[in-house]
């Protein structure tokens, strides 16, 4: 299977979530988690936005050298010489450029002038930085004509020979089948070439993680994701869920998804910062894998397996329960029973639940177990 590069954009995308701001110490802590988990690239900010962003990037680059990090640090900016010139001075080696080919942009600027600007920008980076990593994001694939998208991709892949061509569903309006078709058509242009294809999906319709996975299946080899899927509007793909799914399908990733406890710490840290600064909790009962609901069971068939990494396993007994679920409940609460009466206990629990029109309590379960005996 193909090697998949993990591009963690928690810092930069997180700064676009409902006014959230990360301090320098918080950015360094996030990078500590990323380094420990084997993230390949970290997008640490948007340097041209403000002098403070430039200082953050400079400090982070220096600190990464001091700490001997192998994670690659990147910054995002417009595909303009005036933007990248400010990034070059920070010590960055990874440059993420974004440009647009929407109808709105093309009404103001010809495609030839956009190509000319892109070429000037890429050549400037290469003249100033030794062996830079250059990524260009085409905004956005859901609102750009496919033939125009192919023309732009061909120019970036074959003329400029950039390192990464990112295909973002910036509007977050595409479905997995639409993502697959678009990414597959562009990935075919990059086969055997220097350029790798990245996928960046927004979550406006709740499909960012699924769309990111589908982009990889269609031929991309770089996932642009974040902790808890934090990001602009409804966010982007979730780093853990996306990586776990891909690894389970046999793809090769450096990301250490087996370090579930560190991932939980990472998610809890980002969640705590977000709650402190915005009053919003990202990590909740329904968060996939890490939320407490991932280990609560009601239906019998779900009581057999382990789903996720919730802090506590819980069982709720009502008319939907089965033998396996009741057994697990009795063991968890250390309620003694004779196995030959298990079916009778299950029937008693169902009857009590139906009568009360709710889940039964632990005390009620104990009473039912006592009555089931000889």
Image (cartoon, rainbow, N blue to C red):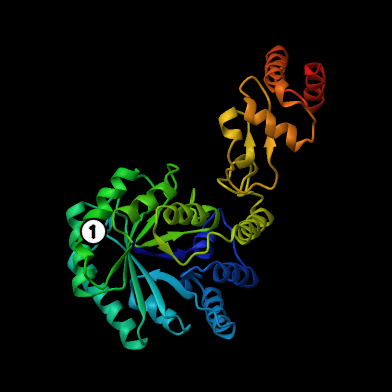
Q: Kindly identify the residue that appears in the image at 58 percent across and 39 percent down.
A: 305
Count the marks: how many?
1
Percent x, y of residue 278 = 64, 53
Vertical relation: 328 (above or below) 261: above
Q: Pick the residue in front: 187 or 315.
A: 315
Identify the element where label 1 is drawn.
helix
Vertical relation: 13 (above or below) 89: above
On the question of residue 13 being in view, the answer is: yes
Kindly identify which residue carries mark 1: 186
Percent x, y of residue 77 = 40, 70
Percent x, y of residue 1 = 34, 61
Count neighbours of disc 1 (C-alpha within 10 A) and say few if under 14, some if 14 to 19, many if 20 or more: many
On the question of residue 103 being in view, the answer is: no
Vertical relation: 43 (above or below) 347: below
Q: Kindly identify the residue that appears in the image at 44 percent across and 49 percent down.
A: 209
Q: Kindly identify the residue that appears in the image at 69 percent across and 31 percent down.
A: 327
Q: Is residue 48 left or right of residue 334?
A: left
Q: Pick the residue in front: 229 or 184.
A: 184
Q: Pick the residue in front: 342 or 75.
A: 342
Q: Kindly identify the residue that appears in the image at 52 percent across and 64 percent down.
A: 256
């Amino acid at each position: 299977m193909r090697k998949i590069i993990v591009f963690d954009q928690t810092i930069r995308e997180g700064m676009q979530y409902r006014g959230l701001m990360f301090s320098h110490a918080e950015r360094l802590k996030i990078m500590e988690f990323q380094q420990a988990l084997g993230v390949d690239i970290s997008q640490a900010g948007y340097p041209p936005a403000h002098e403070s962003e430039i200082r953050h990037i400079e400090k982070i680059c220096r600190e990464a050298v001091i700490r001997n990090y192998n994670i690659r640090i990147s910054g995002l900016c417009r595909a303009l010489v005036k933007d990248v010139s400010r990034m070059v001075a920070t010590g960055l080696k990874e440059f993420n450029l974004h440009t647009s080919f929407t109808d709105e942009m093309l009404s103001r600027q010809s495609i030839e002038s956009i190509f000319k600007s892109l070429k000037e920008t890429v050549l400037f980076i290469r003249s100033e930085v030794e062996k830079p990593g250059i990524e260009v994001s085409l905004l956005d694939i859901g609102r750009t004509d496919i033939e125009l998208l192919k023309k732009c991709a061909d120019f970036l892949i074959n003329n400029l020979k950039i390192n990464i061509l990112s295909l973002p569903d910036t509007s977050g309006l595409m479905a997995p089948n639409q993502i697959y078709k678009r990414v597959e058509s562009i990935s075919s242009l990059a086969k055997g070439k220097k350029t790798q294809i990245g996928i960046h999906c927004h979550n406006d319709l709740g499909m960012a993680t699924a769309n990111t996975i589908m982009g990889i299946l269609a031929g991309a080899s770089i996932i642009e994701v974040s902790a808890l899927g934090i990001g602009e509007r409804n966010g982007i793909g979730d780093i853990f869920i996306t990586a776990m799914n891909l690894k389970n399908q046999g793809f090769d990733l450096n990301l250490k998804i087996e370090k579930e406890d560190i991932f939980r710490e990472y998610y809890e840290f980002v969640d705590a910062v977000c709650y402190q600064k915005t009053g919003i909790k990202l990590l909740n009962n329904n968060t996939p894998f890490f939320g407490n609901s991932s280990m609560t069971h009601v239906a019998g068939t779900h009581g057999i397996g382990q789903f996720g990494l919730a802090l506590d396993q819980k069982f709720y007994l009502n008319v939907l329960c089965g033998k396996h679920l009741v057994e697990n409940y009795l063991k968890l609460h250390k309620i003694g029973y004779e196995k030959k009466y298990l079916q009778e206990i299950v029937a008693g629990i169902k009857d009590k639940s139906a009568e009360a029109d709710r889940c039964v309590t632990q005390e009620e379960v104990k009473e039912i177990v006592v009555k089931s005996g000889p």
